[in-house]
């Protein structure tokens, strides 16, 4: 077998394996999403599934939603005592964030950020995509202005029940994640929670 044929065969097998893995992963995710979030409803194997699916989702989402993927993957190891500070201006330009900055500047107090869950949906519209990316990373966090810095503080943890719609498929169901699945792993100590600050000059 020539080197070219051997390489082509490896590529085809890799694509088939990836397709099979993604298909199986989406099927299992759908089943897990529809299970009521109670510890008794999930076996040890189910928890392993959620753990591995979470890793896969974090890696796959990284090129599209790098900030929230980073936050999610941070949960796989214990957090330091003090929030990690990451220099980034990715959240600037969002109408929700800019309004929050103005209010925080006037009041001198942190202001809570909030978006509806349907903001999370992936869009090919650049402004909607940017807002989805920011909302996923910062929803429920706080904006404060500290000197010449704008700081977005987020407590990285999952709620007990909240479906996050991510990818709408026309004519079919929206692909999403029931965040309570990861809340369950938090309760079991398989995932960790902690603080993170995104910081940028004013």
Image (tube, helix red, strand yellow):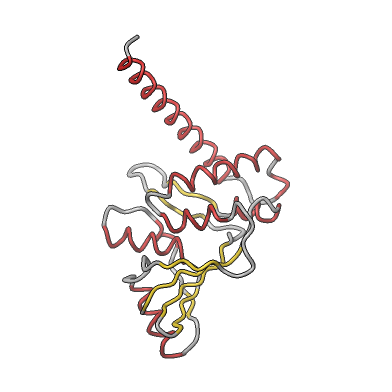
Q: Viewed as shown, does residue 37 lie left or right of 71?
A: right
Specify the quadrant that holds the N terminus: top left
The number of numbered badges drawn on the structure is 0
In the image, 23 versus 3, the foreground residue is 3
Q: Is residue 25 above or below residue 160?
A: above
In the image, 34 versus 191, the foreground residue is 191
For image coordinates 39% across by 28% down, the residue present is: 15
For image coordinates 42% across by 68% down, the residue present is: 87
User: Horizontal and vertical percent for residue 22?
Assistant: 46, 35
* Figure quadrant of residue 67: bottom left
User: Horizontal and vertical percent for residue 142?
Assistant: 49, 75
* Figure quadrant of residue 119: bottom left
* Figure quadrant of residue 118: bottom left
In the image, 76 versus 16, the foreground residue is 76
User: Horizontal and vertical percent for residue 19?
Assistant: 42, 30
Specify the quadrant that holds the C terminus: bottom left
For image coordinates 51% across by 36% down, the residue present is: 25
């Amino acid at each position: 077998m020539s080197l070219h044929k051997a390489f082509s065969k490896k590529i085809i097998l890799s694509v088939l394996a990836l397709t099979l893995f993604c298909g199986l992963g989406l099927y299992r995710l759908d089943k897990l999403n529809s299970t009521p979030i109670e510890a008794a409803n999930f076996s040890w194997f189910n928890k392993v599934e959620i753990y591995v699916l979470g890793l896969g989702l974090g890696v796959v989402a990284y090129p599209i939603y790098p900030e929230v993927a980073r936050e999610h993957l941070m949960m796989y190891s214990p957090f330091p005592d003090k929030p990690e500070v990451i220099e980034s201006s990715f959240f600037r330009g969002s109408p929700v964030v800019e309004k929050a900055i103005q209010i925080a500047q006037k009041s001198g107090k942190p202001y809570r950020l909030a978006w509806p869950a349907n903001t999370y949906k992936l869009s090919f519209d650049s402004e909607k995509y940017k807002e989805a990316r920011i909302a996923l990373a910062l929803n429920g966090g706080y904006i404060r202005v500290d000197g010449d810095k704008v700081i977005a503080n987020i407590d990285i943890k999952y709620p007990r029940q909240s479906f996050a719609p991510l990818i709408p498929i026309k004519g079919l169901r929206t692909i999403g994640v029931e965040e309570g699945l990861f809340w369950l792993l938090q309760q079991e100590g398989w995932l960790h929670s902690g603080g993170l600050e995104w910081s940028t000059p004013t």
